[in-house]
């Protein structure tokens, strides 16, 4: 399994609180067969979670070395950027990170309400060579009765990442039902843990998750969304 969305980076957001916690999280990931992880700390404008790219690069450098030497896990850096109208400018100024400095940017939208300019923000990013990846679409309750919204985003060129444990009910029955719909509609391109601490058991659920995903999308598509598309992001290759 390759993890596109996680909060392992210590002390910068609501994820890992210390280097010790991060190491515990990496140990658990290794135990459960995770081989590659993108650290995606929150960047929420005008909040205490404005994890600047250059600061994050300094924090992650020794962790990359540790993870590789201790567990043979490849670690990369990005952000989970909370959608705002200044994203393109923040990117150009080097404040926020794409995933492994690729064209791909992980983006979160409001969880419980709709905002009118999401599509225009995504269009601006796409027009400037950035491919948005919508984080955990199955969790946006405002869109539970609006599957067309996700089809329209996908047609624009937006990709989508599900939280792996949604498929086993970790985020509730409604999120589980929604992620099944998204998977069956072939709208999911990536899987991530969205893990925040060493107390969470999300990686321990991977065998059960793998079984359920394969049942829904089949072996070939399972490999695409859990392995191959992740590799394409890291190499900055095209994803259809």
Image (cartoon, rainbow, N blue to C red):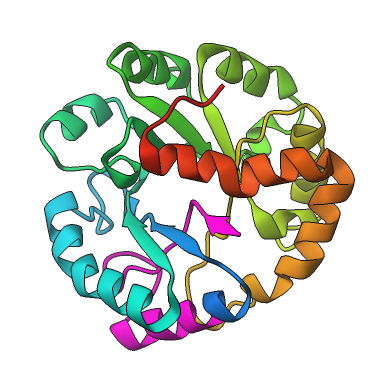
At x 64% / y 42%, what residue is drawn? 225
Residue at the right extreme, as displayed: 215
At x 84% / y 59%, what residue is drawn? 211
For this view, does 210 lie left or right of residue 157? right
Q: The N terminus lies in which quarter of the figure?
A: bottom right
Residue 188's x, y, as percent? 66, 35
Compared with residue 153, is residue 139 higher up or lower down, i.e. above or below? below
Residue 4's x, y, as percent? 49, 51
What span is colored magenta in the figure? 1-28
Compared with residue 191, is residue 170 higher up or lower down, i.e. above or below? below
Q: The C terminus lies in which quarter of the figure?
A: top right
Question: Is 81 included in the stretch rendered in magenta?
Answer: no
Question: Is 16 included in the stretch rendered in magenta?
Answer: yes
At x 56% / y 67%, what residue is drawn? 34
At x 52% / y 13%, what residue is drawn? 156
Compared with residue 234, is residue 155 higher up or lower down, i.e. above or below? above
């Amino acid at each position: 399994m390759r993890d596109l969305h996680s909060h392992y980076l210590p002390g910068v957001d609501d994820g890992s609180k210390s280097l010790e916690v991060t190491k515990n999280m990496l140990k658990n990931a290794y135990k459960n067969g995770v081989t590659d992880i993108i650290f995606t700390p929150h960047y929420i404008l005008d909040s205490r979670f404005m994890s600047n790219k250059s600061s994050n690069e300094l924090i992650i450098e020794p962790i990359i070395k540790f993870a590789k030497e201790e567990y043979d896990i490849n670690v990369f850096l990005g952000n989970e950027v909370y959608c705002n109208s200044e994203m393109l400018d923040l990117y150009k100024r080097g404040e926020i990170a794409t995933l492994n400095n690729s064209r791909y940017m992980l983006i979160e939208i409001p969880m419980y309400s709709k905002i009118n300019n999401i599509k225009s923000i995504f269009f601006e990013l796409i027009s400037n060579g950035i491919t948005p990846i919508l984080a955990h679409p199955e969790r946006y309750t405002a869109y539970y009765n609006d599957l067309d919204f996700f089809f329209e985003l996908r047609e624009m060129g937006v990709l989508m990442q599900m939280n792996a444990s949604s498929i086993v009910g970790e985020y509730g029955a409604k999120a589980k039902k929604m992620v099944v719909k998204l998977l069956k509609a072939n709208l999911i391109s990536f899987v991530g843990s969205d893990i925040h601490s060493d107390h969470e058991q999300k990686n321990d659920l991977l065998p059960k998750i793998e079984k359920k995903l394969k049942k829904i999308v089949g072996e070939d598509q399972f490999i695409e969304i859990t392995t191959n598309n992740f590799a394409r992001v890291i190499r900055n290759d095209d994803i259809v």
